[in-house]
Amino acid sequence: MLFTQKLSNLSGLEKKIKSNQFKQARNKFYLKIKSNSYGFINDLYEKKIEYVYSIADKLKNNENIIFLGTGGSSLGGKTLVSIKTNFFLNEKKPQIFFLENVDQVSISGLLDQLNMEKTSVVVISKSGETIETLAQFFFIKKIISKTNNYKKRIYVITENKQSTLKKIQEEEDYLFIEHNKHIGGRYSVFSVVGLLPAAVTSFNIRKFVEGGKKFLKFIENENNFDSFFFSSLAMILLQKKGVNISVIMPYVDNLNNLSFWYKQLWAESIGKKRMGTTPVNSLGTVDQHSQLQLFLDGPRDKFYTIIGRKKINKQTILDCSFGNKNKIEVLHKKSLEILLRAEMDATIQTLQNKKLPVRLFELESVNEESVGSLMMYFFVETIFSCYLVNVNPFDQPAVEEGKILTKKKLKVNEY
Ligand code: PA5
């Protein structure tokens, strides 16, 4: 496997793997796989890589690419893009931006800096009706439509059905890319939605998809399934004992966005009928100086998922032979990577010592394949956990009320 999982403080729960709850949920998952019921999995085997690269090549002719979308229409792509790009600087050409919010101040702040003649816009919305995404588009349209040939630089990813966005795309003759109707928003990272932004960078989308497939192949074996998803069962069982929060904490900067992706996947899928744990994201080592005190000594209501990597290619050895030697000699001739590792291990050990439930996912190295496998792990875990608690992993009924209310408020000119 491209990553390993180590568990701590879950003993006593192992026998529950023999429970009907576990077996039924696992069998349901296997049955659905057998009957090709998951659109996002079927899509892995579609020949689409060349097609995605052909669109990415067109996009690369620009200085800037702005992706519009929210939730599942942005978080997957954003995660993949951040695997290969500089954590601090958006330095490569084309520069890639994700607009997720409708805050005019930040959007204007960005657009004012960009040459819109050399900018492409990709509007992503499965439904074609998301008000935030449409509003972003209308805002940008006002600006980009003043530039030459702008219609050739607007791309629309949406389902091939009548919707507000589809109608705009047809009327304005923008390039249309079909969103597979069998793939839900938050399950779309292996589809064109996640792959297109990634393909614009040096991220190898073929290897990423292979990584996802490899994980699925691995869990065809029941023993592998059981050993990897025992921790998912444990998380569900511990909720009955008040463990209501799922903390995800990578010790890898380039996986920070993966936590945001996980947060949405988990929350929107399982948070139904009073079920679900609340996802909280954290970044090691940064949050050791922020949340860790609470994690260790606050309420014992959290389950910890730490993500680390085994190796990086090049490590720079530190010279600490100046200043106050006594204090920092432990660091002398070590690398930042060794320090990061030591801090991660120390965090895990302190959590273990406090008898808190922890699991460590360790990636052989952070690359397209291992990230593909890990993201597939989280997909399967989410679906399987929803089956464990009998909720539908694919809908999000409760947020509909707010969407309707927003439109009502706009209609009566409340503002
Ligand atoms: O995961 C989901 O289904 C949601 O978070 C959607 O991705 C989000 O609401 C955006 O929807 P759409 O792609 O239809 O604009």
Image: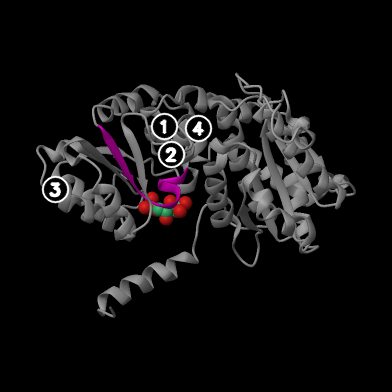
At a point 60% along the width and 34% down the height, the residue shown is 34
Dot 4 or dot 3, earlier in sequence: 4
Dot 2 or dot 3, earlier in sequence: 2
Image quadrant holding the N terminus, namely top right
The nearer-to-camera label among 4 and 1 is 4
Looking at the image, residue 234 lies above or below residue 90: below
Q: Are marks 4 and 1 in contact (CB under 8 Å)?
A: yes
The nearer-to-camera label among 2 and 4 is 4
Say which element carries label 1: helix
Q: Position of residue 342 (x, y in %)?
A: 75, 34
Residues under labels 4 and 3: Cα distance?
Answer: 36 Å
For mark 3, does the 10 Å Cα neighbourhood hold few (<14), some (14 to 19), or many (20 or more) residues?
few
- Asked which quadrant contains residue 269, the reply is bottom right
Asked if one can make out residue 220 in the rendered structure from this viewpoint, the answer is no
Residues under labels 2 and 1: Cα distance?
Answer: 6 Å
At a point 75% along the width and 49% down the height, the residue shown is 233
Residue 83 shows which numbered tag? 4
In the rendered image, which residue does mark 2 sit on? Answer: 77
In the rendered image, which residue does mark 3 sit on? Answer: 171
Q: Are marks 2 and 1 in contact (CB under 8 Å)?
A: yes
- For the record, the magenta segment spans 63-75
